[in-house]
Image (cartoon, helix red, strand yellow):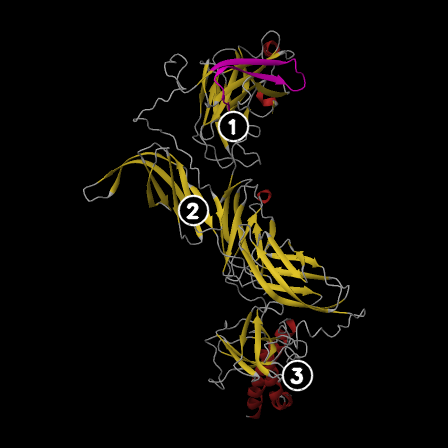
Amino acid sequence: MANIVFNFLHKTRYLLVAALVSALLSTPFSTEAESTTNIKLTASNTIAGESTEIFISNAEPYNEILIEITKPDGNKFNLNTASNASGISNIQIDSKDLTKAGSYLATAKNLTKNSAYSKYISFQVSAAELSEENSSIKLSKNTANSGEKIQATVKLEDSFGNPISGHQLILSSDRETDKISSPEKTTNANGIINFYIIGSEKGIAKIIAKDIDSNKNFNTKLAFTSGNSLERTKIIFAEESGSIASFNLSGLDAESKVGDKQSITVTAVDEAGLTVTDYTGTVHFSSTDANATMPSDYTFIASDLGQHNFDLGFNFVTPDTQSITATDEAQSTIKGSISTVVVTSTSSLDQSIDYQSTYETTDYEREDKFTLISPASGSISDDTIDVSGSGDYGKTAVIYLNDEEAAMVEITKDNSFEYSLEDLEDGTYEIYVDIAQTTVNDEGEVEVTSKIESSEVETIVIDTTAPELGSLTFSPGTSVSIGEEVSATVISENGLKNITLEINGVLNALKESTTAGKYEGDLLIPSAEGTYPVNVVLEDQLGNEADYRAKDTIIVGASATGTVAEPIVETVAKVETLDAPTGLSSASGREEVTISWEPVTAPTGTTISFYRVYYGPSKTELFASSDTLDASTSWLLTGLNGGEKYYFAVVAVDSDDNEGEQSDPIVGTPLKKSTESALKPSAPEPELTTATLPESSPETGPATNILIALSLMGSLGYLGVRKLAKQETF
């Protein structure tokens, strides 16, 4: 029996080996799935409810890019943009997508090239400002015996419900005899800090929590009794209750200075003057000073217990006796007022200085920051920044550009100065000015002896570069029938102000699509047959403009069936008579590809001068081109990225410099620099054209693995049976 099996395996051994080799070769060791990507992302940290920007670099030129953002809760959302000629783009993340505090992850990939995702980066979203409405004080008991310890849990949240950690709080009582302590120093990761309250006497204590970091506070009330009697508790609260009759305003000083921010506490009271703890109406503020700053209308909430502090919400402008009135929005008869004497920066008790006089003092030095007249933070399309402002005559304005001294200017008799920073390159600049006292040293150099005041820092972005046109495509194409609808798509940098296509004197505006940097629109096509050049004008937000004349042509034919009529020869001569090259093929070498094609026959009266090879990352994005030296029908393209797929198309150019029809694109992939051929090390490996090679290699699967396993088992079985046969022979 062993001999029979051995003879069978011996006779089929070549088939088994062939099957093994075939299985191994069919395994997609070099199958191209998603290509790798070198995209780099950077993002700035922000706070909840504020937008931020992601900056993309190292992307493929003029590629659509998909950005995937993962929120702290694991939910994801996508953004789309398009890269420019340098593979760079930036996109704003909307504030509505950044309301959850925590760590966000971002990754991106080239959509046009179907690359893999890039490495993840992270950016942080911190909690926003403390919200008094969302923050709270929770008591373990609302009513306690005198001497009983009550736990007060204070929780800080922003307006989006994010906990605020690391904040210091002070918990106090309006009664000096109450004792409050805490074993904790700051709020924890959940925004919580605990306090303990002991009341030594009966009555109602107002418990106030003040956040040191934001200078905001909120409060609640706690009732202490001398025993456990529920009736006593009811009596205490009954004394606090009653229908609202008016507002009691307190906290405003008898004398206020112009511009000083003031705080006021508004308390809802009944006819007896007791606090109405259940008041939840809306209060509106007004003032006898028409230019005063007042807080917005405020609706009391249950935790206010009828009293709310408006911290630094008021300031006056007009010197005089002024008043503030709080009025219930629903019942105008419920109101309350408070008055103050508004004075200038000098006390009303000392009015010896005549403010209308021309009194001056050479020793006067302002301590606050002054405001530059120009520049103001923003973007400009000029290489010159004009700096001007005011200061005291005899002093010097020292101008700083990116923290380096750029110029010194003497302040003139009219207390002003101006200077122009010229010939600046595109980029971001930070500018500020010091008003200083200067002197001239022994070497004749001007030195700053003392700084008097400084301006705020102004950030100026200079952008004098016109936008670039990445690609221009038409749907259904450039050859259309009269009356046929045509749309255009332009790829350029995102956020352009205007994109206009001019056809036969008619301007067609394109609008940015949901993909940043991609602009689309329908075109008004001429109603007469002919060939019409398409002019493209791009304008960015700063007014930088790029004008591309005759970037493409639209050929309009008269046939209603869609057959394009012959073009008008007088418009563009001979362009249509040059046929598209055929028979394209490619051969790949190390970081280079040789393209070959069949010659194009020139029309009568002209000759083929040379051929132009277009190439790029996709069939619709052939951005680069290279001209042959003569009418030869092959051309070597060097300096390509090894291992990356390119598309190639060829057009003929005649002796009148007319460009013919473009060939159908083919694909070619240059070899990587380290790739070597075992058979012909010095010769480039040929590559099949798209006519014979499918876009992707076959996928591996269970059938391939089973074939390999069966081949190996057959080989091992053959060796085992052969050994057994030999043993039987002996």
Q: Which residue lies furthest to the right in this view?
A: 560
Camera-nearest label, 1 or 2: 2
Give yes or no for residue 642 being in the magenta stretch: no
Q: Earlier in the sequence, mark 2 or mark 3?
A: 2
Q: Tag 2: residue type?
A: Ile
Span highlighted in magenta in the image? 313-341
- Residue at the disc numbered 1: 154
Near-viewer residue (242 or 465): 465
Give the crowd class for mark 3: few <14, some 14-19, many >=20 residues within 10 Å: few
All told, the count of numbered labels is 3
Residue 660 place in picture, x, y as percent? 64, 76
In which image quadrant can residue 347 be found?
top left
Q: In this view, does 184 lie above or below 545?
A: above
Seen at 49% across and 74% down, the residue is 672
Report if residue 230 is visible in the image: no
Residue 288 place in picture, x, y as percent? 55, 17
Question: Considering the image in quadrants, where does the N terminus appear?
Answer: bottom right
User: In the figure, is residue 168 to the left or right of 282?
Assistant: left
Q: Is residue 467 above or below residue 582?
A: above
User: Is disc 1 placed on a helix, strand or loop?
Assistant: strand
User: In the figure, is residue 179 to the left or right of 511?
Assistant: left
Give yes or no for residue 316 being in the magenta stretch: yes
Residue 385 is labelled as 2
User: Is disc 3 placed on a helix, strand or loop?
Assistant: loop
Residue 603 is labelled as 3
Residue 531 place in picture, x, y as percent? 69, 69
Disc 1/disc 2 C-alpha distance (Å): 51 Å
Q: Tag 1: residue type?
A: Val
Give the crowd class for mark 1: few <14, some 14-19, many >=20 residues within 10 Å: some
Q: Earlier in the sequence, mark 1 or mark 2?
A: 1
